[in-house]
Image (cartoon, grey):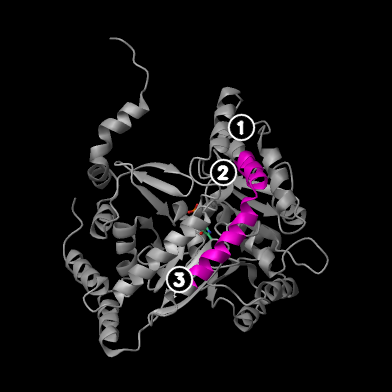
Amino acid sequence: MTAHTFDLSALVARRSPELFDLHAETINPAYVKVLRTIGFDRPYLKGQGAYLFDDRGQRYIDCMGGYAVFALGRNHPGVRDAIKQAMDLDLPSLPGIGPFRLAGMLAEELLKIAPGNFGKVFFASGGGEAVDAAIKMARGYTGREGLLYCTRAYHGLTIGALSVTGNHEFRDGLGDMLRSSTEIPFNDLNALESELKKGTYAAFIVEPIQGKGINIPSDEYLRRVRELCTRYGTLMILDEIQAGLGRCGAWFASEHFGAGRGAGQWQADIVLVAKALSGGFVPTSAVICTDEVHRSIFSSMNNCSRIQNTFSMNDLSMAAGLATLHYMRQEQTVQKCAAVGQRLMEKIREKLSRFEMFKEVRGKGLYIAVEFHRPRSMALKLQWDMIHKLDPSLFCQAILMPLLSEHRILAQVAGHRLDVIKLSPALVFSDQDAEEVAGALEQTVEQCHRLTGPLWQVGKKLAEAKLKPAGV
Ligand SMILES: Cc1ncc(COP(=O)(O)O)c(C=O)c1O
């Protein structure tokens, strides 16, 4: 028998026609059913920058950005090359009992840009894992168990992270979470203080801007959180996994609220990053903490690897991380994101303000929410109520489905039971892209204000689909 080299491109070409059937058969039939029902079953074949391309070469503007992992855009040539270079160096990846060659350098880069004076970095592979590590650090440091988190917070789906996630759809039916976790409303300092006073909480974990809904706190909220946490001996964990690393038009979203290392600025005890860190190529996350917190958990030779995981500091992740930060600086990705995000919001506001279902557009950088609300006129109100009665999460599909099918723009709902569309494209999104997205939104929302428009059609289609089982 002759030996053949593995030919991935031939394999991809050969099996492409079965993409959705294979996924349904071997991975998740219910998910494929959802994609097919809402017309999101597009055979994307390539990704470049802020765009996706299907098997016919048609271009889509991707406003989801792989759930916000693409800062530099898909398949950035520089980051891709850095990964290839790392492979060609034949490095002793994952030495196990030796320092990891590239990890210290990436840690150093993160410490340089972090919003505050931090001393150490712990690497993990996914965001949820980083949250779990931060929970352990806070418990180790304070000797307390309690965890405080916010309604609508999303911190991931490992059991630790899920225990501090305030979106209950993800928890229902899964049994007990960490019992010492308590939910409080976001942006509510009184609720926070009355819990902190109990003196039982190891940490308060909070996103600077909540990803589910793009909820922006008041200007003073995070600074006051810092003060209260210090007063009651609770650590402040800032989850910048999605909002950080340029997404909000600053290296860290918390900088918009005064975080930093300068005079008069405040800092959290622990800051978490992931998503954009490795250019969307290799899973990587990082827990950035103060030396003091770090010392308390890795306090002796016996427990120097008390928190660890197998793959976290692998060379490909670390090389991708180093290259991502390098090119983000070189290409001024963060500054450009701030400017284009601002213009995108202005354009959307300008185009949608005349519609009665439009409530507002809000966000920072390219972390944007377009929110809708119940219209005033009777006929539209009836349709609005009908679709919400069918399913409180359905309304946005009446906009997202035509946005994709008629305009080739991919976007997502900002969370369960919300009338909010979320836009989180790659940060290399251009003014031309902004123009196209705002124009397409205008046309789609206009159609929704017609009585037999998408609101009616989508409601009907999805109601019928819900009645069928999730088979292939
Ligand atoms: C704010 C935030 N924290 C944590 C996570 C969990 O990250 P991962 O999905 O990599 O576990 C996410 C993922 O969306 C997130 O947005």
Q: Residue 245: percent from the left, percent from the top?
A: 61, 54
State the residue in front, 76 or 230.
Answer: 76
Badge 2: few (under 14), some or many (20 or more) residues near its Cα, within 10 Å?
Answer: many
Q: Secondary structure at mark 3?
A: strand
Q: Earlier in the sequence, mark 2 or mark 3?
A: 2
Badge 3: few (under 14), some or many (20 or more) residues near its Cα, within 10 Å?
Answer: many
In the rendered structure, which amino acid carries the disc numbered 2? Ser
Residue at left 21%, top 57%?
470
Residue at left 44%, top 56%?
64
Marks 2, 3: nearer the viewer: 3
Residue at left 53%, top 70%?
346
Residue at left 71%, top 71%?
226
Q: Earlier in the sequence, mark 3 or mark 1?
A: 1
Badge 1: few (under 14), some or many (20 or more) residues near its Cα, within 10 Å?
Answer: few
Report the span colored magenta: 321-349
Residue at which label 2 appears: 278
Q: Earlier in the sequence, mark 2 or mark 1?
A: 1
Q: Are marks 2 and 3 in contact (CB under 8 Å)?
A: no
Residue at which label 3 appears: 370
Residue at which label 1 appears: 96
User: In screen coordinates, is 8 left or right of 332?
Assistant: left
401 versus 419 height, above or below: above
- Quadrant location of the N terminus in the rendered image: top left
User: In screen coordinates, is 112 left or right of 346?
Assistant: right
In the rendered structure, which amino acid carries the disc numbered 1? Gly
